Image: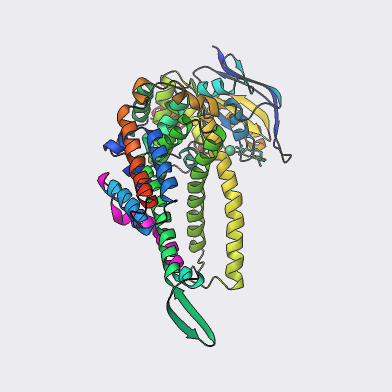
């Protein structure tokens, strides 16, 4: 998707070489099961499992953590909010004026649970991303018979996202070149007006660019059907191999076993 | 010689009403080097997009090789005619150069072995083999231009169209591109470029088509570039070299130089005569 992941995904470990369809299904399966887990321990095991695989395929952790900053921010926000809005066993309380604020254990648990669910899902997608190039993922969707229109939408959304980002960077530079002060408060009228204009122009410019990008793709023969030929005749070595299936089953079974242990009351 | 592109009475209006082409007639011969010359807004890009079936004729006809350009033939036309867009950033969107160059061949449904072969030879043709695994975003403008060209060459079209190919290129980039264009002509490709650069047209083209406000104003060899009526009508400028020799007194030699090379040989002749 971005260059960082694209470089990771050009490595060659046994997981990189797995069939893309198996990877997609495994990851979706993992997310499905792990987000239904009810216990912190179960989720922690699932999350650790993904992290171990990420490490095994040679993903450096600190850039990942940077990229996932928003997940942690979100987690932080949950921890700050949930304990105070969830009814349950009181663990501490403050008096602010004539208002009393109480934090509950249930709230904290709930926040951690939600955070872990999000984290494990995001890490699972990261794993897919780090071991599969964007093009392969898109082709994987196609081979899984996802409707062409849906695949197209995903493909373009991702591409235009970058087009948009580039456009924004360019405009930022141009604004700075004309001595626009980036550090001023965004709440004065002039700044708000500038921001509104930037958004409007960004929209218009990216529409224009998106159209040109699309034209350039058409010019090189892009267009639903012929593009699909790439997978219509699936070659022998492209068929899903036993090893792929075993791996996929192993991956999903591990996750499933956490679920079963939890359901059986062994953990959590 | 055989025409590989024929345009007959072509009109085209954009949705919001601008009539960009108003009855274009044009023949392009196989293996020729054609410069479509005209000021900004003349309709050059609009015309070029017809050759690649990205614009379909509203009235009139466009033929490419034996095909009439239409919705039905657009896919085949696009494999015969390659288009290099003005801004390489519009054309390049993949994460690596190699992946981007293979986009066209993959769309053509070629086998992966064939794709690899074509990508390698396209990269070699524009001399960027060493950039194959780089991310296009970090390349210089000139390098991106080459990636964009390679992406088209890999489809092995007979006809290649360039929209403003020299815009924003530095002198080295221009020289490199001229060399690539020369190589392609030698291979037998037909090359069409749109430009407002009269010097370039004089230097490179064997046929020049001047268009102005959606109509063909004149066509012919570079001789038309010193016709004051045409140049003025088209809001263009004389080639730089021609401007110099226009100011010099008539000397009975009717050869009028337009390129630096021609100017040098004329000056040498004058010096020899005067010695
Ligand atoms: N996408 C578009 N929508 C509406 N009008 C356009 C579009 N592209 C070009 N035009 C108009 O069509 C005319 C010809 O433009 P164009 O073919 O881009 O000229 P050139 O390439 O010679 O500069 C101009 O008046 C231009 O404003
Ligand atoms: Mg143009």
Whether residue A134 is situated above or below residue A37 in the rendered picture: above
- Residue A133 drawn in magenta: no
Looking at the picture, tell me which residue is in the foreground, B197 or B111: B111
| Quarter of the image where the C terminus of chain A is located | bottom left
Q: Which residues are magenta?
A: A56-79
Looking at the picture, tell me which residue is in the foreground, B148 or B238: B148
Q: Residue at x 31, y 27 (%)?
A: A242
Is the stretch drawn in magenta largely helix, strand or loop? helix
Whether residue A183 is situated above or below residue B7 in the rendered picture: below
Kindly indicate the quadrant of the structure image that contains residue A201.
bottom right
Q: What is the x, y in percent for residue B104? A: 46, 28
Q: What is the x, y in percent for residue B32? A: 51, 20
Q: What is the x, y in percent for residue B107? A: 47, 26
Furthest-top residue in this view = B1
Q: Residue at x 71, y 38 (%)?
A: B15
- Specify the quarter for ligand 2: top right
């Amino acid at each position: 998707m971005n260059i960082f992941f694209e470089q990771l995904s050009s490595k060659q470990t046994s997981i990189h070489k797995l069939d893309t369809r198996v990877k997609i299904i495994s990851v979706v399966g993992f997310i499905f099961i792990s987000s239904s887990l009810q216990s912190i321990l179960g989720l922690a095991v699932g999350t650790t499992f993904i992290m171990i695989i990420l490490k095994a395929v040679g993903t450096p952790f600190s850039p990942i953590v940077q990229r996932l900053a928003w997940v942690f921010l979100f987690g932080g926000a949950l921890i700050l909010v949930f304990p105070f809005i969830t009814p349950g066993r009181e663990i501490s309380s403050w008096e602010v004026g004539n208002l009393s604020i109480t934090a509950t254990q249930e709230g904290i648990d709930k926040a951690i649970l939600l955070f872990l669910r999000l984290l494990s899902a995001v890490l699972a997608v990261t794993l897919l991303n780090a071991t599969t190039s964007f093009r392969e993922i898109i082709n994987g969707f196609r081979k899984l018979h996802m409707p062409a229109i849906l695949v197209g939408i995903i493909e373009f959304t991702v591409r235009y996202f970058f087009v948009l980002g580039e456009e924004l960077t360019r405009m930022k530079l141009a604004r700075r070149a004309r001595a626009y002060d980036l550090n001023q408060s965004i709440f004065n009228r002039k700044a708000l007006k500038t921001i509104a204009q930037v958004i409007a122009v960004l929209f218009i410019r990216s529409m224009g660019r998106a159209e040109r990008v699309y034209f350039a793709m058409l010019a090189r023969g892009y267009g639903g059907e012929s593009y699909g030929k790439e997978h219509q005749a699936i070659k022998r070595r492209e068929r899903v191999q036993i090893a792929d299936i075993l791996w996929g089953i192993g991956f999903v079974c591990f996750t499933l076993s956490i679920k079963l242990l939890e359901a059986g009351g062994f953990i959590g | 010689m055989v025409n590989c592109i024929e345009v007959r009475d072509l009109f085209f209006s954009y949705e919001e009403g601008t009539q960009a082409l108003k009855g274009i007639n044009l023949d392009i011969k196989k293996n020729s080097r054609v410069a479509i010359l005209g000021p900004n807004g003349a309709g050059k890009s609009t015309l070029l997009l017809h050759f690649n079936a990205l614009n379909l004729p509203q009235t009139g006809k466009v033929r490419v090789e034996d095909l009439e350009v239409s919705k039905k033939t657009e896919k085949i036309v696009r494999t015969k005619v390659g288009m290099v867009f003005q801004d390489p950033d519009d054309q390049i969107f993949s994460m690596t150069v190699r992946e981007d160059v293979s986009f066209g061949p993959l769309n053509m449904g070629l086998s992966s072995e064939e794709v690899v072969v074509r990508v390698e030879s396209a990269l070699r043709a524009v001399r960027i083999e060493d950039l194959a695994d780089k991310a296009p975003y970090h390349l210089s403008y000139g390098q991106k231009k080459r990636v964009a060209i390679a992406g088209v060459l890999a489809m092995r079209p007979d006809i290649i169209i360039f929209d403003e190919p020299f815009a924003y290129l530095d002198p080295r980039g221009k020289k490199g591109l001229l060399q690539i264009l020369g190589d392609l002509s030698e291979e037998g490709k037909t090359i069409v470029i749109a430009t407002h650069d009269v010097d370039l047209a004089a230097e490179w083209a064997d046929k020049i088509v001047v268009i102005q406000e959606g109509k063909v104003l004149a066509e012919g060899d570079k001789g038309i570039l010193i016709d004051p009526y045409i140049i003025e009508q088209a809001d263009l400028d004389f080639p730089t070299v021609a401007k110099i020799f226009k100011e010099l007194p008539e000397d009975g030699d009717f050869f009028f130089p337009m390129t630096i090379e021609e100017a040098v040989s004329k000056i040498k002749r004058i010096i020899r005569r005067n010695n």
